[in-house]
Amino acid sequence: MLKFTKDHEWLEIDGDVATVGITAYAAEQLGDLVFVQLPEIGTTLDKGQEVAVVESVKTASDVYAPLAGEVVEINEAVVNDPSIVNSDPEKTGWFFKLKLADLGSLDGLMDEAAYKELIG
């Protein structure tokens, strides 16, 4: 199941774990990424908490936790080569995996149709 946030993050849900990244729209708006900073495994996050930083040739931007949970895995590949996020933001360019604290909180996120309407 794929969900989206108004902050241009996508979540692929598998059981109680969400793989999180930024959308293709967000990657396009940022431009060529030159730096990605991810959270440490084991970090407990609250919804809306700053969790990662991305920097492009144009700007720096924070990435926020879409839901509460614990970081159980990070994608070292995007730290070592941020261009992966630009080339494949919604697959191999994922940022981290989050063990969700409350599956009911998924109801507050958008489906793909609603997200496409948001970005017009």
Image (spheres, helix red, strand yellow):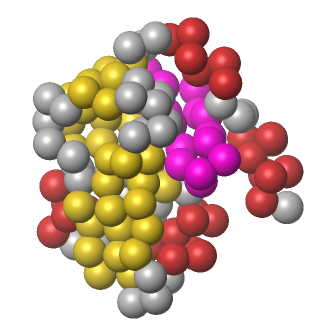
Q: Nearer the viewer, residue 91 or 37?
A: 37
Does residue 37 appear left or right of residue 55 in this picture? left
User: What residue is at 40 percent from the left and 40 percent from the top?
Assistant: 49
Which is the main secondary structure of the residues drawn in magenta? Answer: strand
User: What residue is at 49 percent from the left and 55 percent from the top?
Assistant: 22
Whether residue 17 is visible, yes or no, is: no
The reply to whether the magenta stretch includes residue 52 is no
Report the label total: 0
x%, y% of residue 86?
A: 44, 72
Q: Is residue 44 above or below residue 87?
A: above
Q: Nearer the viewer, residue 112 or 118?
A: 118
Q: Is residue 62 above or below residue 96?
A: below
x%, y% of residue 6?
A: 66, 47
x%, y% of residue 24?
A: 57, 63
x%, y% of residue 89?
A: 46, 60
User: What residue is at 33 percent from the left and 62 percent from the top?
Assistant: 53
Whether residue 36 is visible, yes or no, is: yes
The reply to whether the magenta stretch includes residue 10 is yes
Quadrant of the image containing the C terminus = bottom right
Magenta segment boundaries in residue numbering: 1-14
Q: Quadrant of residue 55?
A: bottom left
User: What residue is at 80 percent from the left and 41 percent from the top?
Assistant: 113
Does residue 8 appear left or right of residue 79 in this picture? right
